[in-house]
Amino acid sequence: MISSMKCTASSLTCSAFSNRKLPIARPQLVTLPTINNVEQNMGPSQLCSQKPLYLSSTENLALVRRRRVTECQAYEADRSRPLEINIELPAEEAAQRFKIGVYFATWWALNVVFNIYNKKVLNAFPYPWLTSTLSLAAGSLMMLVSWATRVAEVPKVNLDFWKALFPVAVAHTIGHVAATVSMSKVAVSFTHIIKSGEPAFSVLVSRFLLGEAFPMPVYLSLLPIIGGCALAAVTELNFNMIGFMGAMISNLAFVFRNIFSKKGMKGMSVSGMNYYACLSIMSLLILTPFAIAVEGPKVWAAGWQTAVSQIGPNFVWWVAAQSVFYHLYNQVSYMSLDQISPLTFSIGNTMKRISVIVSSILIFHTPVQPINALGAAIAILGTFLYSQAKQ
């Protein structure tokens, strides 16, 4: 909106003041100071006929006497203020929140389904190395088909990308196998209670190996995490040392995976979906020879035949479901990182563990003592406090 008008003396007309027809008054002689008198009073340095004259008001100009006088205030153009307009788009904000909510709901649901089928498979077929390999193989095959059919955009990567991805894939492979070994020995709920202590490993590794300092609230948030995990482990009815150590090794491996990913993958322009796809392919190549060496085809064939004879054809569906859902829930979690902040992701990860623990207890009828449930609640609360203090 134009609130002021600039006019020069040479271009000042009646139309500049008003377009309405006003009654014409009789002209009267008005004595104006001459240029010479003005020069004597103001001096030659203060008057220049080449500069335009800016009128601030016409009240004092008695050229014409009128009852209605139109005021004209003129200012320099560079003194005008820009209009401050805040445009809020509630529709876009609502759409973004809805999108994040869909990501979280899908992530949690897929993770719950994977853990249920994974535990069913491991109960009937206790070979975690092959189970881990099949999970990576299913995801790698799905993404290769998606790239070949142009359903997903083919990532543009080079040799430097694969070199930087290699240590990330090694840590990811170790963490994946260790978690599967843990769930083959103990309840799903216990594995996830111990895995909720991952922030403690992250702080300790970053502090003593990388020299990174944290504020005091971060260190204080580790107390309920460590105390809750210890309380849950001591009161676990079906405690198993291999299962406990598997969850601990998984925590440590995933901490190094995150560290390697932050350092080596900085500046790499790859989407979350394609990044995890490449990670799965490289992890599959790393894991396959070790799985064959540790367990072997003969053991797998005998165990497979036993499981099919006991469970029936549904066992094949269980294996396929746990393999597909493993890739899907990880893929959605990596895709959500492109849309949300690390703090929101940490809170979502904490809520994910709660959903997995509760659902596994209900489905598998896992016996839980009140003191064990208290330890789990304290550990999860500490994880939430850590995510808040870290920011």
Image: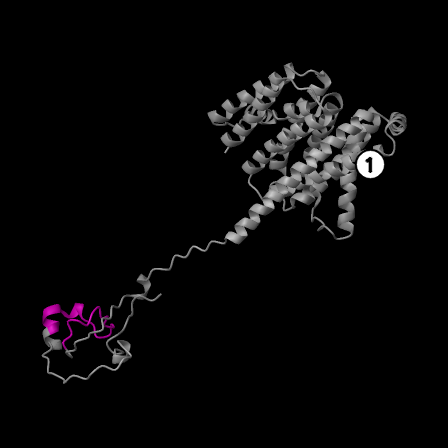
Residue 389, relative to residue 97: is it above or below?
Answer: above
Closest to the observer, 118 or 341:
118
Closest to the observer, 83 or 68:
68
- Identify the residue shown where x is 84% and y is 32%: 315
- Identify the residue shown where x is 33% and y is 67%: 2
Q: Is residue 48 magenta?
A: yes
What is the quadrant of residue 42 in the picture? bottom left
Q: Residue furthest top?
A: 234
Quadrant housing the N terminus:
bottom left
Residue 132, relative to residue 246: is it above or below?
Answer: below
* Mark 1 surroundings: few (<14), some (14-19) or many (≥20) residues within 10 A: few
In this rendering, would 93 be left or right of 369?
A: left
Residue position marked by numbered label 1 in the rendering: 317
Residue 353 at x, y percent in the picture: 63, 30
Q: Which residues are magenta?
A: 38-62
In this rendering, would 311 be left or right of 254?
A: right
Under circle 1, the secondary element is: helix
- Identify the residue shown where x is 50% and y is 22%: 220
**Magenta region, mostly helix, strand or loop?**
loop
The kind of residue tagged 1 is Trp
Residue 297 at x, y percent in the picture: 88, 28
What is the quadrant of residue 332 in the picture? top right
Residue 267 seen in render:
no
For the rendered model, the colour scheme is one colour
Residue 21 at x, y percent in the picture: 25, 82
Residue 361 seen in render:
yes
- Identify the residue shown where x is 64% and y is 24%: 193
Q: Is residue 56 magenta?
A: yes
